[in-house]
């Protein structure tokens, strides 16, 4: 699954650790999601959408 987390994080000058703290996950989880190695759970996707004030679809795109 493609996502814009890295871009959104960089726009705010946040580290992976910063974003992990805001989303209450590990930095390793953020790293894996950004690299497309791990798809976020639906609750985590909703939490990210609320944090960035965007829709889930604006942040995460299905690669199908």
Image (spheres, rainbow, N blue to C red):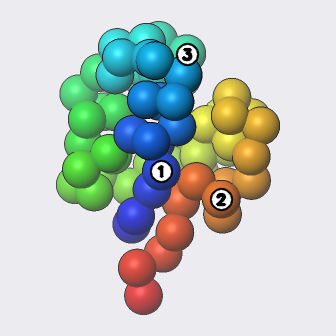
Question: Residue beneath label 2, please?
Answer: 58
Any part of residue 26 in sight: no
Q: Is disc 2 placed on a helix, strand or loop?
A: helix
Any part of residue 47 in sight: yes
Q: Earlier in the sequence, mark 3 or mark 2?
A: 3
Structural crowding at the residue carrying mark 2, measured as other residues with C-alpha within 10 Å and reported as few (<14), some (14–19) or many (≥20): few
Residue 51 x %, y %: 69, 28
Q: Residue at x 44, y 42 (%)?
A: 7
Kindly report which numbered mark, 1 or 3, lies closer to the viewer in this rendering. 1
Q: Earlier in the sequence, mark 1 or mark 3?
A: 1
Q: Quadrant of the N terminus?
A: bottom left
Question: Residue beneath label 3, please?
Answer: 22
- In the displayed structure image, the side of residue 40 where residue 28 appears, left or right: left
Residue 43 x %, y %: 62, 42
Q: Is disc 1 placed on a helix, strand or loop?
A: loop
Q: Earlier in the sequence, mark 2 or mark 1?
A: 1
Q: Quadrant of residue 30?
A: top left
């Amino acid at each position: 699954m493609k996502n814009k987390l890295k871009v959104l994080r960089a726009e705010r000058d946040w580290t992976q650790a910063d974003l992990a703290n805001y989303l209450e996950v590990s930095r390793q989880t953020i790293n894996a999601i950004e690299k497309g190695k791990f798809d976020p759970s639906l609750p985590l996707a909703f939490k990210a959408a609320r944090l960035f004030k965007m829709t889930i679809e604006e942040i995460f795109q299905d690669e199908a």
